[in-house]
Amino acid sequence: MFEKIVVGFDGSEMSEHALRLACQLAEKFGSEIHLVHTPQPHTVAFAMGAVAGYHAATTMPSAEEVQQAADKILDAGKAIAKEHNQTIKQTYSESGDPADHIVACAEGCGADLIVTGRRGLGAVGSLLQGSTSLRVNHLAKCPSLTVV
């Protein structure tokens, strides 16, 4: 049913849930998993030491620090897949709009399904559904599943 599954992964708890569900589907259907992470400098800055109430005092990370953080997040995704006896067929990491990159990846690899978490690390979005998952649902040319 699903030969290729694209998962949007930012390291958040909900994106981990999305990846775990994608792994379960991949096991059931023998699917490939493609993992997409779009590093965002503001979330890297927060992870590097921002303290609640003092976000403005944190300096923005260098390109190298952003890439190192992206590599760690992708490694965490690979570890989750391994826990489920799955492997990640390919990883994608590029700066820009996460929804655009997730959809482009899905189109590029011929995905049958896109899986995202309902809310991620982004600060912008509606209360019920994050801006990335909502935008993916609007742009996707294949089914998309938003996981709680």
Image (spheres, helix red, strand yellow):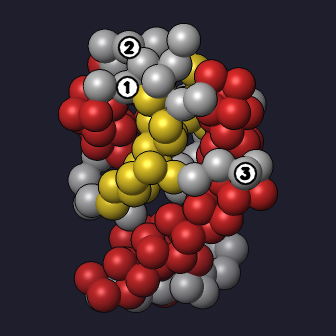
Residue farthest along the front direction in this orientation: 30
Q: In the image, which disc is placed on residue 134?
A: none
Residue 107 location, x and y as percent?
A: 25, 27
Query: Can residue 54 be seen in the rendering of this structure?
Result: no
Q: Specify whether 115 is left or right of 139.
A: right
In the structure shown, which secondary structural element does the residue marked by tag 3 occupy? loop
Mark 2 element type: loop
**Which residue is under mark 1?**
111
Residue 98: which quarter of the image? Answer: top left
Query: Where does the C terminus fall, quadrant-wise?
Result: top right
* Label 2, residues with CA under 10 Å away: few <14, some 14-19, many ≥20: some
Q: Residue at x 44, y 44 (%)?
A: 34
Give the amino acid at mark 2. Cys
Q: Give me the C-alpha separation between circle 3 and circle 1.
A: 21 Å
Which residue is at the front of the view, 124 or 63? 63
Q: Which quarter shows the N terminus?
A: top right
Q: Is residue 87 above or below residue 143?
A: below
- Tell me what residue is drawn at x 25 percent, y 53 percent: 96
Neighbourhood count class around disc 1 (C-alpha, 10 Å): few under 14, some 14–19, many 20 upward:
many
Nearer to us in this view, 69 or 25? 25
Q: Secondary structure at mark 1?
A: loop
Task: From this view, report whether residue 58 is shown above or below residue 38.
Answer: below
| Residues tagged 2 and 1 counted as in contact (Cβ below 8 A) | yes
Q: List the residue tagged with mark 2.
A: 142
Residue 97 in view here: yes
Q: Residue furthest right?
A: 83
Marks 2/3: CA–CA distance: 26 Å
Q: Amino acid at mark 3?
A: Asn
In this view, the residue in front, 90 or 53, is 90
